[in-house]
Image: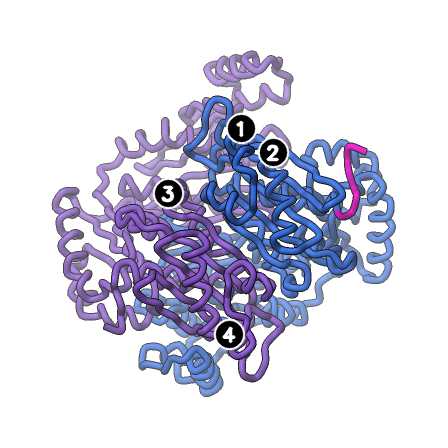
Chain colours: A blue, B purple
Amino acid sequence: MSQVPAELISIGDELLYGQIVDTNSQWMSAELDKIGIKVIRKTTVGDVESEILRAFGEAEGRADVILISGGLGPTNDDLTKPCLAKYFNATISLHPQALKELTHLFESRGFTLNERNKKQAELPDKCTMVRNRLGSAPGMWFERNRKIFVSMPGVPHEMKEMMQREVLPKVKAFYQTPTILHKMIKTAGIGESWLADKIKDWESNLPPHLKLAYLPGLMQVRLRLTGTGPDRPILEQEIEREIAKLLPLIDPFIFGFDSETLESAIGKILVEQQKTLATAESCTGGHIAQTITSIAGSSRYFNGGVVPYHNDMKVNLLHVNPETLKKHGAVSEQTVIEMANNVRDVFKTDIGLSSSGIAGPGGGTKEKPVGLIWIAYADGDKTITKKLQLGDQRLINIQRTTIAALYLLWQSLTQKNREK
Amino acid sequence: MSQVPAELISIGDELLYGQIVDTNSQWMSAELDKIGIKVIRKTTVGDVESEILRAFGEAEGRADVILISGGLGPTNDDLTKPCLAKYFNATISLHPQALKELTHLFESRGFTLNERNKKQAELPDKCTMVRNRLGSAPGMWFERNRKIFVSMPGVPHEMKEMMQREVLPKVKAFYQTPTILHKMIKTAGIGESWLADKIKDWESNLPPHLKLAYLPGLMQVRLRLTGTGPDRPILEQEIEREIAKLLPLIDPFIFGFDSETLESAIGKILVEQQKTLATAESCTGGHIAQTITSIAGSSRYFNGGVVPYHNDMKVNLLHVNPETLKKHGAVSEQTVIEMANNVRDVFKTDIGLSSSGIAGPGGGTKEKPVGLIWIAYADGDKTITKKLQLGDQRLINIQRTTIAALYLLWQSLTQKNREK
């Protein structure tokens, strides 16, 4: 069973001059992989007609699916549309449906179209329009000799929406690809090599058509189990059977599957346990609250949070004892304990979660170096604290602390404690 | 004066299957750009001999400098070295200097070399060894017809060290490269096509060696002016002159240059004006506070924030009038006005910034649809509000609202008002 070969072409000078990292193509590769399309080449070219046309020709020579991103803006340096028209010998003209959607988009945002915007509703006559729900540049779908060229915007959220809603289902329908099933197992609180050690026997006994990949991230490791075969129900059963064997080995670390995140898993548990939450954040500066409220419906369990950045506010708003701050400092176990407990009272919630630390890169001392961070969980019955010693990268420290605090909350809610 | 064209070739299946983001090539592009080498293409291929050889041939056809990363490990799927040997018709044999350094590296880490490791000290006879101070795979430098092929490890810190210490100085010495200067102009509060309209005369009058690119992002557009020429001081002057002409055209929208962000620009202004800030966020859930505190040293001007997610908290903590909430609702101009003003009192700051809206995807009504969001700025003298009508994507709405609030704050601090 041979796989359909694909090539990704990214267009834009900004990608060649090193001004932005191309995260689109990694995401596109992973999505294509899920439906059994194999990316064999990635090509990045600048905003130069001859280079773009040459890349199209080369790609057509070796791949069946050619996905193009970028170069669809309304300005003169955006060349993807005229290049595709030239390549497919097509004429560009105003596309009534595209104009209708563009007008609608602009009106919904309170703007009126100018002539330059209108040009975005022009399309080559040999393509099918691909809807862009989040932006003004429609995508284009070309077919020739059972090969597909699809052009999408370079703006990541527009491209992702278009690819997921329009392009992937169409590509999947176009080719007969084998069934590929992925099951993602989400873990936190354990490093990659410890995880690998715990599951090595299970891993080495996997049948050859089930493959395991470790995808490490910031304080989390995702395990991806991929099955390939002709029959979907059988494959699903096999994967479920393997997961059932895996669970007891690393249960305290698994917070969910597939698209579950720590914050969505926590949300479900809080709703189920009918508990409410409030946050008191110093060094994370609102990042914990923001992560929790990124989940739709979080107002059911999240009463709110406070970011008492200035020490006076820890006293005035959260009633932290000034003596505690004086004796132990703002970055101390005692302070996060008071913050977590008091924020429960202020917001009238069951649970309080707090953080205080030196995010860096400056502000450290010998006793309290940059990267020293305390977090606490309190629920009225008990208070649990954790000390983190991180590096000197401010944004990474904020992210790591947020994940550590969410993991502490999840552990406490589920009473899964790896020390047990 | 023509620029030396370069191509970057990244080798590795993991880059094609979407398991890691290729950050190397962005870094390499930026470094080459600084010494006047122009990347015209980036190519990624998998661990397949025919694909690698084809990529070498194509690259030699269009570029003078070919930088290859990845595929130098000790395992069988690492093919870069044998492919280069084949391509240059070279013989691989043990390289005494490479062996010496490898032995030294292993000894310093307390290991002894095994046969598999020893293979890493073998090199093709037609290349010059490039030292790898941080790892076991040496780099390789090939020359043919004034074209250069350099192979480096894929491990980011090894590649960067090798490139900075060895490769870039050598490439710079090899070619007489022109100077390339970039100036990035950062704008917010105006769409790409409106911006293009305002500066079209200026843009079309640019001399041919100064090029303009539009780099749009979420509610922000970056303009990149790139100059190429033989003389750096003259080029710097020319760019300054063009920027001076550009400024009056779009001054109300320019918040900074180069690596400036809205939040860092705001931080500088607050420090300069000796003003303090507090935030009261409903729909943004802490994202504004988190963005402001992402800047090191923000504790100098940010006293803190509150996320009164539950309506009771808007009353209890921020003293919003219950009548206001009853009559106009939480998502209303009146409510954000009270939030912005009252948070100043609570946190004892000069300025208050607030948000309230329906981030979605649920929770909308006919009168107040999903995506309706109010933001407010208050400084004691004046209160400025803004109504946003966004889409139904929760995370995008939160991000857009944050940028809109920061832009409102920046506008108010600088008294730059485009309506004026």
Q: Amino acid at mark 3?
A: Arg
Disc number placed over residue B28 in the picture, else none: none
Chain for disc number 2: A
Amino acid type indicated by mark 2: Gln
- Residue B124 place in picture, x, y as percent: 48, 26
Give SS at disc 1: helix
Chief secondary structure of the magenta span? Answer: loop
Where residue B76 sits in the image (x, y, percent)? 64, 33
Task: Please tell me if label 1 and label 3 are on a single chain.
Answer: no
> Which region of the structure is painted magenta?
A413-420
Please report contact status of discs 2 and 4: CB closer than 8 Å, yes or no: no
SS of the residue under disc 2: helix
Q: Would you name the residue on which mark 1 appears?
A: A327
Q: Are marks 2 and 1 in contact (CB under 8 Å)?
A: yes
Disc 2 target residue: A334
Q: Are marks 2 and 1 on the same chain?
A: yes
Q: Is residue B373 above or below residue B286?
A: below
Q: Tell me what residue is drawn at x 41 percent, y 66 percent.
A: B376
Q: Which residue is mark 3?
A: B300
The answer to whether marks 3 and 4 sit on the same chain is yes
Question: Residue B324 got which mark?
Answer: 4
Mark 3–mark 4 CB contact (< 8 Å): no
Look at discs 1 and 3 and give the one toward the viewer: 1
Indicate the chain on which mark 3 is placed: B
**Tag nearer the camera, 3 or 4:** 4
Q: Is disc 4 on the same chain as disc 2?
A: no
At x 22%, y 37%, the residue is B176
